[in-house]
C-alpha cells in the first residue's frame, strides 16, 4: 500500500497488477532502437525488462480521499471480464477489491468514480458479476466520464466489426452504469469536490481527460494514459500504439509535462512503475523526471 498526502488530500495507489507488458519496439510507433538504448540505463529494470524487451507497466487506481468525499480515479481491468485477444486482461481473478478494503474503503463508501477514458484497463471494476449480471461495484457512487469519450465508445460498441474486447468493455463495464442512471457525462472544466477538476486531454482517445488536484498549496495531475511509460517524459514526442490522434496526443503530453514543470504539480499516471509518480523539470525542449520517492 502506498499513500501520499497532497495538501489536505490523501491519495493511495490501489494495484491490480504490475510487470512486463507490451514489447517496447511494438508499443511506440516512433520507436528508434538507438534513441531508446540511450535511455535504457535508467529505465531498466523498473520500467523496462531487457531480457524480454518489454515495458514494465503497473495497472492501478488512484484512491483520493478529501475532507468531503471518497473518490476513485480509474478502475483497472476487473474480474471475470471476457477480453478475447487481450490475454493480459482476460478473465482475471485479482484481489483488487481486497486491496481497496485494506486501504480502509468498502465499495459502498465510494462517492465518485472518475474515468480518464473508457479503455479496457481503466473501467473494469466499474462493475462486478452478481448472479450472472453485471452490476455497479460502487452502488452509491456517481461515475464521471467524458461526454466525448462516452459517445465514441458507445458507437464502437454498436459496431459488429469492432474488436470483441472493445465491445465487451463497453457492454459489461460502462453500459450497466449508464442504464442504472449512475453515469454523469462531463466536459472540460467540470469540478468534483472542491479540489478536483476535469481537463480535456484528448489524443489517446477522442475524449480522454486528465484530473487536476489542487489542495492548499499542493497540486497533482492524474494523467491517465497521456503517458504510459517514464521514457515518454524525455521522449515526449513518442506516442503509444493505442493513441487515436497522434499529433493531438503529442500536444497533450507536452502540455501536461509543461504544466507540471511550471506549477510543481506531481505527475500521477496510470501505468508508471515504482514509485509511480514524479516531479517534472523542463530541460530545454525536453523534460526530465525527479522521482517522488518520499510520497509527498
Image: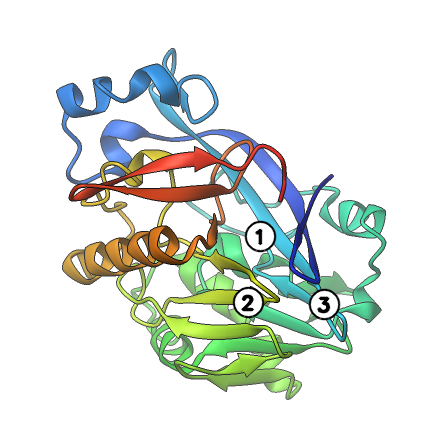
**Residue 50 at what x, y percent from top left?**
36, 14
**Residue 275 at what x, y percent from top left?**
56, 34
Q: What element carries label 1?
A: loop
Residue occupied by mark 2 = 214
Outermost residue, bottom side:
181
Please identify, in this view, whether the residue under mark 2 or under mark 1 is nearer the observer: 2
Between 252 and 23, the one lying in front of the other is 252
Q: Give the residue at x 61% y 52%.
A: 61
Is residue 277 visible from the viewing direction of this image? Answer: yes
Residue occupied by mark 3 = 66
Between 274 and 172, the one lying in front of the other is 274
Label 2 and label 1: CA atoms lie apart by: 24 Å
Label 1 and label 3: CA atoms lie apart by: 21 Å
Q: Is mark 3 on a helix, strand or loop?
A: loop
Q: What element carries label 2?
A: strand
Outermost residue, front side:
217
Q: Are marks 2 and 3 in contact (CB under 8 Å)?
A: no
Rendering quarter of residue 160: bottom left
Q: Do the residues labelled 2 and 1 touch (CB within 8 Å)?
A: no
Query: Does residue 24 appear left or right of residue 101 in this picture?
Result: left
Q: Give the residue at x 64% y 42%.
A: 16
Please identify, in this view, whether the residue under mark 1 or under mark 3 is nearer the observer: 3
Rendering quarter of residue 119: bottom left
Q: Are marks 1 and 3 in contact (CB under 8 Å)?
A: no
Q: Give the residue at x 47% y 83%.
A: 186
Between 271 and 285, the one lying in front of the other is 285
Mark 1 neighbour density, 10 Å: few (under 14) some (14–19) many (20 or more): many
Q: In this view, does 86 lie above or below 42?
A: below
Q: Give the residue at x 62% y 54%.
A: 62
Residue occupied by mark 1 = 76
Q: In this view, does 279 lie above or below 274?
A: below
Amino acid at each position: 500500500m502506498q499513500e501520499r498526502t497532497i495538501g489536505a488530500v490523501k491519495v493511495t495507489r490501489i494495484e491490480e497488477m504490475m510487470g512486463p507488458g507490451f514489447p517496447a519496439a511494438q508499443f511506440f510507433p516512433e520507436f528508434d532502437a538507438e534513441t531508446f538504448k540511450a535511455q535504457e540505463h535508467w529505465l531498466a529494470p523498473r520500467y523496462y525488462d531487457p531480457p524480454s524487451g518489454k515495458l514494465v507497466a503497473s495497472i492501478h487506481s488512484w484512491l483520493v480521499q478529501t475532507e468531503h468525499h471518497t473518490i476513485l480515479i480509474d478502475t483497472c481491468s476487473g474480474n471475470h471480464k471476457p477480453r478475447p485477444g487481450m490475454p493480459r486482461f482476460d478473465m482475471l481473478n485479482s484481489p483488487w477489491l481486497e486491496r481497496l478494503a485494506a486501504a480502509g474503503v468498502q465499495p459502498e463508501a465510494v462517492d465518485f468514480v472518475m474515468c480518464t477514458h473508457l479503455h479496457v484497463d481503466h473501467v473494469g471494476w466499474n462493475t462486478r458479476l452478481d448472479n450472472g449480471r453485471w452490476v455497479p461495484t460502487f452502488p452509491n457512487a456517481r461515475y464521471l466520464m467524458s461526454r466525448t469519450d462516452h459517445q465514441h465508445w458507445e458507437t464502437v460498441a454498436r459496431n459488429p466489426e469492432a474488436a470483441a474486447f472493445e465491445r465487451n468493455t463497453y457492454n459489461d463495464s460502462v453500459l450497466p452504469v449508464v442504464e442504472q442512471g449512475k453515469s454523469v457525462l462531463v466536459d472540460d472544466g467540470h469540478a468534483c469536490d472542491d479540489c478536483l477538476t476535469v481537463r480535456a486531454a484528448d489524443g489517446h482517445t477522442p475524449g480522454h481527460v486528465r484530473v487536476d488536484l489542487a489542495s492548499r498549496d499542493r497540486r497533482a495531475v492524474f494523467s491517465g494514459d497521456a503517458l504510459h511509460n517514464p521514457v515518454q517524459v524525455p521522449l515526449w514526442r513518442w506516442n503509444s500504439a493505442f493513441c487515436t490522434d497522434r499529433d493531438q496526443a503529442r500536444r497533450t503530453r507536452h502540455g501536461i509535462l509543461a504544466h507540471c514543470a511550471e506549477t510543481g504539480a506531481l505527475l500521477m499516471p496510470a501505468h508508471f512503475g515504482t514509485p509511480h509518480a514524479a516531479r517534472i523539470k523542463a530541460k530545454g525542449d525536453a523534460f526530465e523526471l525527479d522521482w517522488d520517492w518520499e510520497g509527498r
